[in-house]
Amino acid sequence: MPAETLDALEELLIEADVGVAATNRLIEAVRGRADDGDLRALVRDELLALLEARPASPSPDVSPRVVLVVGVNGTGKTTTVGRLARLLTSEGKQPVICAADTFRAAAVEQLEVWAGRVNADFIRATTGSDPAAVVFDAVSSGKAKGRDVVLVDTAGRLHTRANLMAELDKIRRVAGRVVAGAPHETLLVLDATVGQNGLPQARAFLETAGVTGIVLTKLDGTAKGGIAVAITAELGVPIRYVGVGEQIDDLLPFSAEDYVDALFEPVW
Amino acid sequence: MFASLSERLQEVFASIGRESRLTPEAVETALREIRMALLEADVNFKVVKAFVDRVRDRAVDREVLDSLTPTQQVVAIVRDELRALLGDGPTGLSVSSQRPQVVLLLGLQGAGKTTTTVKLAHWLKQQGRHPIVVSTDVRRPAAIEQLSVLASDAGVRVHESSADTAVVARAEGAVTTGREMGFDVVLVDTAGRLHIDDDLMAELEAIKSSLAPSDLLYVADAMTGQDAIKSAGEFNRRLDISGVVLSKMDGDARGGAALSVVSVVGVPVTFIGDGERIEDLQPFHPDRLVSRMLGMGDVLSLVEKAEQAVSQEDAARLEKRIRRNQLTLQDMRDQLASVSKMGPLEKLTELIPGMNQTASQLPDGAEVNPRALKQTMAIIDSMTRRERTHHQIIDGSRRRRIARGSGTTVQEVNRLLKQFMDMRKMLRAVGGVSRSRRKKGGRRRLPTGMRFPMG
């Protein structure tokens, strides 16, 4: 295989933030099979196999299903919760939105606007109160009213802040006390512009918050969010949704094919 | 896990042998490690390529400093090149005669513009300025309210204008209010937007041409990856930004995006945000980013030792005292003073070989905060010279005097003395480790940057 082509491939993957380790692994995987055809097609197949071999979203028999949304600051958690609610209502389901971000100024008000737009139940806390308490209220309320899903928005926190990470653990325990097995899904919201720090982020949230899936937001820019590939490869956490625009309907279930095609698309 | 560049280079050169000169092969191996470390720090692919080429040119040419090993030579070149790239131009805000001076904050969604706006207002107040802030984010739900809440918590004046929903009008209103009421800086927070969103970029151009701001600060997330140059580049192309604010530096991201932006876009980093509190915004120091990106604080200290004979003597003296267990409170104060000028304090123990394990043995609550550091120095400053060198003589009456002098309590003085004695004990243990290593393999000394963990 011509080294030049491999170099170009390496550049493409690294510039998409896939990272050195995962890029090397992908290149090693195709290096020996050069003659079998188009290099790109080979890498494409490797990527598809990696991204498609993922555990399905847990679907427990219990109701309500509790979905916890976590991540570092500014990745788009609150917007994602609003859009997830929209996806659910469009499927005819009744979600409860729980505003457990009691830290960021006006986060609750921001989410309240979203809840109004999709006409969902909204359980709020006052700024500065214990987020676990409002989660307890929301899950209890969802259970009492027979709602399908409780969506919990949490405050952004850097994964290096041990005490804030411990708070997530408390939220999980409180939710589990009301509904068996809750939270059933914990989504890590990842900004597509994030670089190699996405991996330690995912690792930390996996360890303390039991992340079961990734939401990759802001894919409508020029960033490719390739670190999500490295996260899936390294930690086995699948990508569940992608955010592709500013409108309320711009959250889509993840499609490995679309994603990989976009990865190879020239930027601008 | 991420192995720091210094460790990697040390491994590379350990296999070559301590006494050998820099061979081209050794340089290539080292360059591979440098490339890897920079890519893992999110420096842009193309920037890394150019950077590695430059280091190669210099590494092959550079005169050999006799006291240095190859590792340190290469690291010194890397450090110099990084410093050269990041520049040492003025940071902070520009000096402007415009009254009120207008500062525009812009960037992608979620970069931290609103938080930075209020932090910057707080910083300006500390500088004796009179800032007023305004939000022009009429799109994100509750964005305007977020700024209001943050600003009122910080005691910063907000230009409220519920009537104005037009973005430019809101900003103009704030400038008018600012002028009429005697505010000398207007900080304009803008909505987050994608650099490829033509309409919204045009909106920023309209604000710019209406207000003629002295500073256009692009707020960038320190965790940004390879995309940093595309987004910052496009913002710069359309708006001619004057500086970058690197936010969320309190995480463990290496912040290599800053290097990309500075070298490709050609705009300096002016401030960094490194925490959730309102005070957590500082003018940018290139050196801190350099050592952070490469995780090479310890090696930097070693290089500095080689280059600064004076501090080398100091270090030797300090080392001797530690070995003889003669460390004094004065030594502690000197080190704290240099520590307070340095980077993230939590990382300090990493500077000392063999200290990483020791750090985990520190008592809980040994987490460092700058205020505690200041207080500790104040306590030592309130001691007599003799007390500083002979801590044993500090009795109850002296403790009361010291507490009064430093504006602390006797309990706090007691705590410091206890920490000091614990530290002596701990350092004796470290000194013992070094001694045993010395027997086995060559000379090993504590680096110049011998720092103290301090709570």
Image (tube, coloured by chain):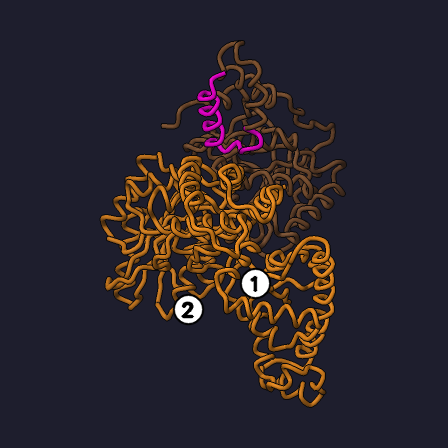
Chain colours: A brown, B orange
Per the rendered image, the range of residues in magenta is A1-23
Residue B323 horizontal/vertical position (percent): 69, 69
Does the image show residue B375?
Answer: no
Q: Amino acid at mark 2?
A: Gln
Foreground of the two, A30 or B312: B312
Relative height, residue B434 to residue B49 (above, below): below
Three-letter code, disc 1: Gly
Residue labelled with disc 1:
B449
Q: Is residue B269 above or below residue B365?
A: above
Q: Does residue A179 appear left or right of residue A112 in this picture?
A: right
Dominant secondary structure of the residues highlighted in magenta in the image: helix
Residue topped by disc 2: B126
Residue B366 in magenta?
no
Task: Identify the residue shown where x is 46% and y is 35%.
Answer: A218
- Local crowd size for mark 2, using a 10 Å CA cut-off: few (<14), some (14–19), many (≥20): few
The C terminus of chain A, quarter of image: top left
